[in-house]
Amino acid sequence: MANLQKFRTHEGINIDTAAEWNVQSRLDISSAAERSSDVSSSGQVGIYSDLEIYFTFDSDSGTSSISTTTDLLIPKETLTFIKVPQGIGETIYLHIKATSSASTKYCRLVTL
């Protein structure tokens, strides 16, 4: 008899799905100041930035969360999807900061 299953059990469990696609207000990163966005209700975040940016997650909405010596970088003009880490706290914030200042540059976020 033919095997009509599309995926084996372990493959089916690892498929990423998202019930919603929420486009957030774009963040002005022109001044290289740190920006944050509440991503608590999301499982994944899509990021596109006009400039290279540092990013991190934490439970504090305040600034000064970014460490330019240890936090990861996302290259400019690259669409990147990142899973939101759970267990940080009840509220989870994504913090971003451009590596340099420029005129009229933005970071676009989509939460899944």
Image (tube, rainbow, N blue to C red):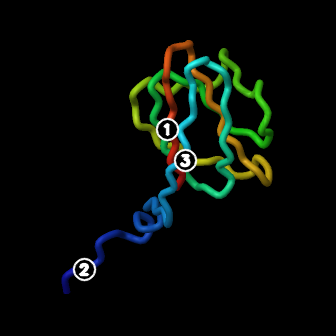
Vertical placement of 99 versus 46: above or below? above
**Which residue sits furthest bottom?**
1
Q: Give the secondary structure at mark 1.
A: strand
Q: Residue at x 43, y 24 (%)?
A: 76
Q: Are marks 3 and 2 in contact (CB under 8 Å)?
A: no
Vertical placement of 24 versus 98: above or below? below
Residue that badge 1 annotates: 108
Q: Give the secondary structure at mark 3.
A: loop
Q: Are marks 1 and 3 in contact (CB under 8 Å)?
A: yes
Q: Residue at x 79, y 33 (%)?
A: 62
x then y, percent, for residue 29: 57, 25
Q: Amino acid at mark 3?
A: Gln
Mark 3 or mark 2, whichever is nearer to me: 3
Q: Residue at x 76, y 28 (%)?
A: 63
Q: Mark 1 or mark 3, which has the lower sequence index?
A: 3
Q: CA distance from mark 3 to mark 2?
A: 40 Å
Residue that badge 3 annotates: 24
Q: Mark 3 or mark 2, which has the lower sequence index?
A: 2
Q: CA distance from mark 1 to mark 3?
A: 7 Å
Q: Quadrant of residue 71?
A: top right
Vertical placement of 40 versus 34: above or below? below
Q: Mark 2 or mark 1, which has the lower sequence index?
A: 2
Quarter of the image that includes the N terminus: bottom left
Residue 12 numbered tag:
none
**Which residue sits furthest left?**
2
Residue that badge 2 annotates: 4
Q: Residues within 10 Å of mark 3 (few under 14, many from 20)?
A: few
x then y, percent, for residue 42: 60, 55
Q: Residues within 10 Å of mark 2 (few under 14, many from 20)?
A: few
Q: Amino acid at mark 1?
A: Arg
Q: Residue at x 70, y 25 (%)?
A: 66
